Image (spheres, helix red, strand yellow):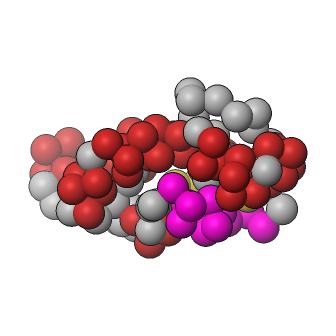
């Protein structure tokens, strides 16, 4: 995880993300994946949290909200956006993360076949 502190420093990491350096967050897990399974990262089009995946399956749109993004250690509290500097430092393209939207905002209508299954 020194890659994260090397990129911006431990204090700056905490200021930006609001999170202490810990392997329990998503960003250090993505760092591990990029280091140990680079071929998986190379062929992955999207990294999604479970709720993001559910929304993708229901609507066809990869989105997350600010609260969920804030729990990843890849979200900047001061810009309300993904921290591109940290993501690039760990080898993850920011474009592989979902769009961040306001919680409760309209995402998209349900994709077939969900309306048919649920009536």
Q: Is residue 25 magenta?
A: no
The boundaries of the magenta stretch are 79-90
Q: Quadrant of residue 22?
A: top right
Residue 104, x across and y down, in percent? 60, 53
Where 68 sits versus 20, above or below? below
Query: Is there any visible trace of residue 57 in the rendered image?
Result: no
> Could you tell me which residue is drawn at 59 percent across and 39 percent down?
1
Q: Nearer the viewer, residue 21 or 68?
A: 21
Numbered-mark total? 0
80 falls in the magenta region: yes
- Identify the residue at image location x=13%, y=55%: 113
Front residue of 111 and 44:
44
Q: Quadrant of residue 117?
A: top left
| x and y, in percent, of residue 82 in the image | 62, 63
36 in relation to 65, above or below: above
The outermost residue toward the bottom is: 95
> Who's the residue at 45% across and 61% down the image?
91
Residue 42 in picture, x, y percent from top left: 26, 63
In this view of the protein, can residue 7 be seen by the observer? yes
Residue 94 location in percent, x, y?
A: 50, 68
Q: Nearer the viewer, residue 25 or 110?
A: 25
Q: Is residue 109 left or right of residue 94?
A: left
Q: Please tell me which residue is depicted at 40% across the width and 65% down the height of the picture.
A: 96
Task: Please state which of residues 88 and 94 is positioned toward the viewer in this rendering.
Answer: 88
């Amino acid at each position: 995880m020194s890659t994260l502190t090397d990129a911006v420093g431990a204090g700056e990491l905490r200021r930006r993300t609001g999170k202490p350096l810990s392997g329990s967050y998503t960003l250090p897990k993505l760092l591990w994946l990029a280091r140990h399974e680079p071929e998986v990262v190379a062929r992955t089009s999207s990294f999604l949290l479970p709720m993001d995946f559910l929304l993708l399956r229901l609507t066809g749109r990869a989105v997350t909200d600010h609260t969920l993004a804030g729990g990843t250690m890849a979200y900047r509290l001061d810009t309300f956006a993904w921290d591109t500097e940290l993501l690039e430092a760990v080898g993850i393209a920011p474009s592989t993360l979902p769009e961040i939207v306001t919680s409760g905002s309209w995402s998209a209508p349900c994709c077939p076949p969900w309306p048919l299954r649920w009536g």
